[in-house]
Amino acid sequence: MIARRLNAALMQSLLLRAAAVAMVSAALLITLAPPPAIAALIAMASVGATVVLILPSFRRIIGDLLHRSEALVKGHIDVLGVLGGTVARREHGRATDNSRLVLYAIRIAERAGLSAEQIRVLIKGAFVHDIGTVILPEEVLLKPGPLDTTEYEAVKTHVFHGVEVLSRSRWLKDASPVVRSHHEKWDGSGYPDSLKGEEIPVGARVFALADVFDALTSERPYRGRLSFDKAMAIMLMGRGGHFDPELFDAFAAVAAGMYDEVQARSDEDIEHELLIMAFRYFQSPGQGR
């Protein structure tokens, strides 16, 4: 509200300055009644004076708008991080696990040549992909052993609850396909809709690769961390079955590099890098709304 009033005051100042220059010019033209050539020069001088007077104020308005736009985008990204980090902390004990996963998803998407708009949607969906798990009891979510049939069916409902949460936000609802479909499989054996091939939204296909890779190379309640080579061998068996084969090849091309990058960085460095990457995709006009 304060910023809006300041901008209104600046615009009023601009209009007053422009009106003053116009009145002076009109007075000169009426009083002197100069020849056409002189009148044209007076008019040109009037325009130039107006520009000189209002340009500093225009710069202030533009600078203020850019600053507020940047703050708004960073605020949106912070909220995404808080939401996703809260879910990750409950599941894995560390909020930064989610930051690492989102970073993987962006790297794969970039290698695969997704558009900026597709990556924006992917980032939002990746941050909050498991937000629907908040409805699951911890004895199921954190169970160290295999789930029984009833427990597994309960876990599968988290995608529906996640979509329902996102539907309440105009800014987040376009990420619903990633949240709903990130457990679908290329061969149609996934859930919840048994989608097959390119029926699966591309963001969900990319995220599935990041999600499984991160799960295999991280500590879990039911098993220890696997080595990079072991994780890649397991994932390779899913090429064309679990995973889109073309996207898998894009993932395989950057997997070692992004894995080494993450292993060499602190949690704080990972979060900082993610903020920079995400901001780059959301800073264009209209993306912070």
Image (tube, rainbow, N blue to C red):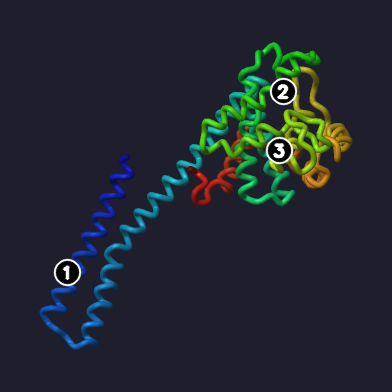
Q: Earlier in the sequence, mark 2 or mark 1?
A: 1
Out of 219 and 54, give the one closest to the viewer: 54
| Badge 2: residue crowd in 10 Å (few <14, some 14–19, many ≥20) | some
| Corner quadrant of residue 104 | top right
Indicate the quadrant containing the N terminus: top left, top right, bottom left or bottom right: top left
Q: Earlier in the sequence, mark 3 or mark 2?
A: 2
Numbered-mark total? 3
From the image, state whether disc 1 or disc 3 is nearer to you: 3
| Badge 1: residue crowd in 10 Å (few <14, some 14–19, many ≥20) | few
What label sits on residue 23 in the rendered view?
1
Query: With respect to residue 234, does 33 lie above or below?
Result: below
Tell me the CA gap for discs 1 and 3: 62 Å
Q: Which residue: 63% across, 20% down?
A: 90
* Element class at badge 2: helix
Residue placed under numbered mark 2 in the picture: 156
Determine if residue 152 is in view.
yes
Q: Position of residue 284 (x, y in %)?
A: 53, 51
Q: Earlier in the sequence, mark 1 or mark 3?
A: 1
* Contact (Cβ within 8 Å) of mark 2 with mark 1: no
* Element class at badge 1: helix
Q: Position of residue 126 (x, y in %)?
A: 65, 35
| Badge 3: residue crowd in 10 Å (few <14, some 14–19, many ≥20) | many
Mark 3 residue type: Ala
Mark 1 residue type: Met
Mark 2 residue type: Lys
Tell me the CA gap for discs 3 and 2: 16 Å
Q: Which residue: 24% across, 87% down?
A: 37
Residue placed under numbered mark 3 in the picture: 204
* Element class at badge 3: helix
